[in-house]
Amino acid sequence: TLRAGVVAVQGDVTEHADAVERAADAHGVDAEIVEIRSDGLVPDCDVLLMPGGESTTISRLLDREGIADEIRAHVDAGKPVLATCAGLIVASRDAKDDRVTTLDLLDVTVDRNAFGRQVDSFEAPLDVAGLDSPFPAVFIRAPLIDEVGEGVEVLAEWDGTPVAVRDGPVVGTSFHPELTPDSRLHDLALFDELAVEADA
Ligand code: GLN
């Protein structure tokens, strides 16, 4: 059984838990969901999810509860993370906002709410590297990824800007793959990355 930790200090936690369960089913693996609200749980997790929500709140609580350092150690050990929207903001190198202490898991900088200034939320079919048909991407006050480091692979672009990126074991999306029934992105980011085989 794989342990999937969902960072649960704030944000759309149940949606991520449901999505990772669907992805595990599709992949033929057993997954146990662990909701992370305090320290001591991350070290036992095989994969981690960082939900959307409010990045200022999430980063403050991760720091206060001592979870931030544990997430960094998880990534240093090469274990997968999927970070969406506010999760991507927190996982970035810099969000150019004093209220967000970023974890620097992904070598990108982001502009919080940049898409939101143009249009609050929208859904678009997105071509994603590694998926054989478009993914229904839901954007809600989404961050703009404005600088992408050398080692970062752009998995998808919208309107000429990156909206899904991979940096080693960490995948970040500006949009919310947890808000549609399609669990392929969770599968791609977490289970493909672990190269887990279906349970015999
Ligand atoms: N704009 C939000 C933030 O800065 C993120 C929005 C979302 O996660 N849907 O935290």
Image (cartoon, grey):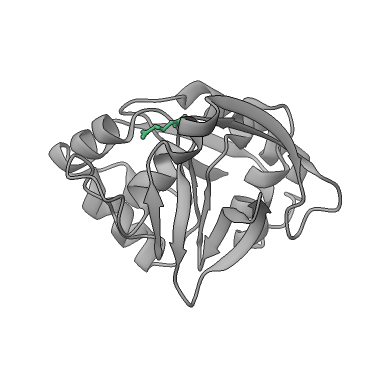
Q: Please name the residue shown 50% across and 68% down the image.
A: 168
Q: Is residue 169 above or below residue 180?
A: below
The front one of 181 and 200 is: 181
Most distant residue in the left direction: 64
Residue 154, relative to residue 149: is it above or below? above
Q: Is residue 90 left or right of residue 88?
A: left
Q: Residue at x 44, y 72 (%)?
A: 149
Q: Quadrant of the N terminus?
A: top right
Is 59 or 6 nearer to us in this picture?
Answer: 59
Give the mark count.
Answer: 0
Residue 173 place in picture, x, y as percent: 54, 47
Specify whether 8 is left or right of 169. left
Q: Residue furthest right?
A: 133
Q: Is residue 166 left or right of residue 64?
A: right
Q: Nearer the viewer, residue 197 or 68?
A: 68
Residue 96 visible to an observer of this rendering: yes
User: Residue, x 45% and y 57% (percent of image)?
Assistant: 146
Above or below, comparing residue 108 to residue 47 in the picture:
below
Residue 166 to residue 116: above or below: below
Whether residue 28 is visible: no
* Residue at the far bottom in the pictured view: 150
What residue lies at 65% left-to-right and 59% top-to-bottom?
155
Quadrant location, ligand no. 1: top left
The spot of residue 6 in percent (x, y) is 44, 35
Residue 152 image point, x, y percent: 51, 69
**Residue 34 falls in image quadrant:** top left
Residues 2 and 23: in front is 23
Residue 29 in which image quadrant: top right
